[in-house]
Image (cartoon, helix red, strand yellow):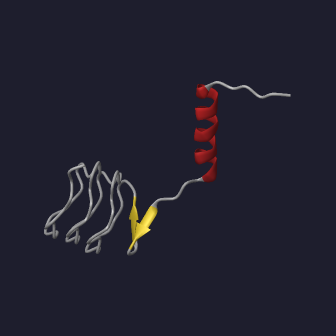
Amino acid sequence: MRWQISAAEALAGVFALVVASGARAQTINGCEIKPITNCPDANLGGANLTNANMPGSNLFMVNLAAATLVGANLTQADLSRGILTGINAVG
C-alpha cells in the first residue's frame, strides 16, 4: 500500500500538529516572548529575538543591548528608557 498526499494536505497536517501541541512562547530571563507581554526592566541584552512577535508589549526600561531583532515585530511596544545600543536589526 502506498500513501500519496498533496503538499497542501501535508502542510495542513503540520499546521494541525503545531496548533494541537499548544506551542508555547519562548521565555528569556523571565520575559515571555509573545504579543502584549509585560516585561518592564527585562534583561534581553544579547538575546536572539529573530522574528520575535511582541506587538503592544510593555518593555519599559528593557535592556536590548546587542540583541538580534531581525524580522522582529515590536509595533506599538513601549521601549521608552530602554537600552538599545548595538542592536542588530538588519538581516
- Compare residues 60 and 2 and report the one nearer the observer: 2
Measuring from the top left, give residue 90's x and y in whole percent.
Answer: 20, 50
Q: Residue at x 33, y 59 (%)?
A: 49
| Drawn side of residue 15 relative to residue 79, left or right | right
Left-right relation of 23 to 47: right
- Residue sitting farthest toward the front: 2
Residue 16, above or below 67: above
> Residue at the spot x=35%, y=54% of the render?
52
The image position of residue 70, as x and y in percent, is 27, 52
Of 55 and 63, the residue lying toward us: 63
Answer with the quarter of the image where residue 62 lies.
bottom left
Say if 72 sits above or below 49 in the image.
above
Residue at horizontal 58%, vertical 33%? 11
Residue 26 occupies which quadrant of the picture?
A: bottom left
Residue in front for this viewpoint, 52 or 87: 87
> Which residue is outermost to the right?
1
In the rendered image, residue 13, in percent from the top left (x then y), is placed at: 64, 36
Q: Residue at x 18, y 62 (%)?
A: 87
For the image, the number of numbered tags is 0
